[in-house]
Amino acid sequence: MHQSTGTDFVDTLLEGGFESDVITTIYGPPGCGKTNICLLAMMQVKEKKILYVDTENSFSLARFKQLCPNYEEVLNRTIFLTPSNYQEQKEAFEFIRKSITNDFGLVIVDSIASLYRLELSGDAVNANRELGLQFALLSEVARKRHIPVLITNQVYADFDDSTRTKTVGGDIVKYWSRAMIEIQKMRGDLRKLIVAKHRSIKDGNFVVFRIVQNGIEEVKG
């Protein structure tokens, strides 16, 4: 089962869209379009509720109005959680554990790593343990409820190879994410969306796009 990404060319790349029973992690540098992908996915949820965990204050009502003609109806079905520290993020995940039912059609965490990253400067062992628990919970939600779970994540430079980036959370993120999509900034306003990990699609398949007023558009050639 798949849910449309809201964009035909991304649906084609992902052979139907986001898988409904796994975690999909979308990662890349700031301003590359990760949140836009999440907003477009929200528009595809019909009738069911949406849970949006916004740890970076990334959700823009003005942008969502540009994308979604029936934005009021969608927002009325959306529950927003806005943790400002890692303890509040833990509480948000406790809410998810208790509250997610079959009435929900999408879970978004934008982003999973920003507050976790701050926590690493203190108790790194506990921060990693908690991150693993949060991913395990999201994986269970996706698998048992057949709800697509979208997570955005940050990147940092690979000190051994300056041409590559690594995801914050490292092996924990890779282990629990059955699909991983990398977004890279290219020249000008171009972006490359790359399949980095997938159960049925070849790693490295990609499309090039730019962000426009009504969403994103493919750039060929």
Image (cartoon, rainbow, N blue to C red):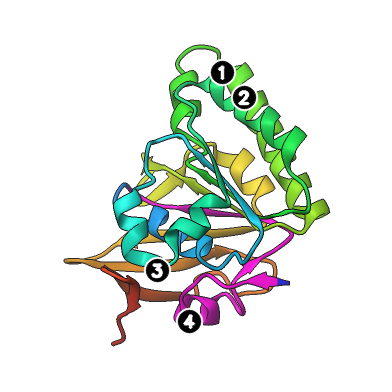
* Residue type, numbered disc 1: Gln
Q: Are marks 2 and 4 in contact (CB under 8 Å)?
A: no
- Residue 90 is tagged as 2
- Residue 87 is tagged as 1
The local secondary structure at tag 4 comes to helix
Q: CA distance from mark 3 to mark 2?
A: 34 Å
Label 2 CA crowd tier, 10 Å (few <14, some 14–19, many 20+): some
* Residue type, numbered disc 3: Pro
Q: Are marks 1 and 2 in contact (CB under 8 Å)?
A: yes
Q: Are marks 3 and 2 in contact (CB under 8 Å)?
A: no
* Residue type, numbered disc 2: Lys
Q: CA distance from mark 1 to mark 2?
A: 5 Å
The local secondary structure at tag 3 comes to loop
Front: mark 3 or 2: 3
Residue beneath the point at 39% across and 48% down: 165
Q: Identify the residue position indicated by label 4 in the image.
A: 8
The local secondary structure at tag 2 comes to helix
Label 4 CA crowd tier, 10 Å (few <14, some 14–19, many 20+): some
Q: CA distance from mark 1 to mark 4?
A: 39 Å
Q: CA distance from mark 1 to mark 3?
A: 36 Å
Q: Position of residue 92 (x, y in %)?
A: 61, 30
Q: Nearer the viewer, residue 29 or 39?
A: 39
The local secondary structure at tag 1 comes to helix
Q: Quadrant of residue 20?
A: bottom right
Q: Position of residue 95 (x, y in %)?
A: 68, 31
Residue 219 visible: yes
Q: Identify the residue position indicated by label 3 in the image.
A: 69
Range drawn in magenta: 2-29
* Residue type, numbered disc 4: Asp
Q: CA distance from mark 4 to mark 3?
A: 18 Å
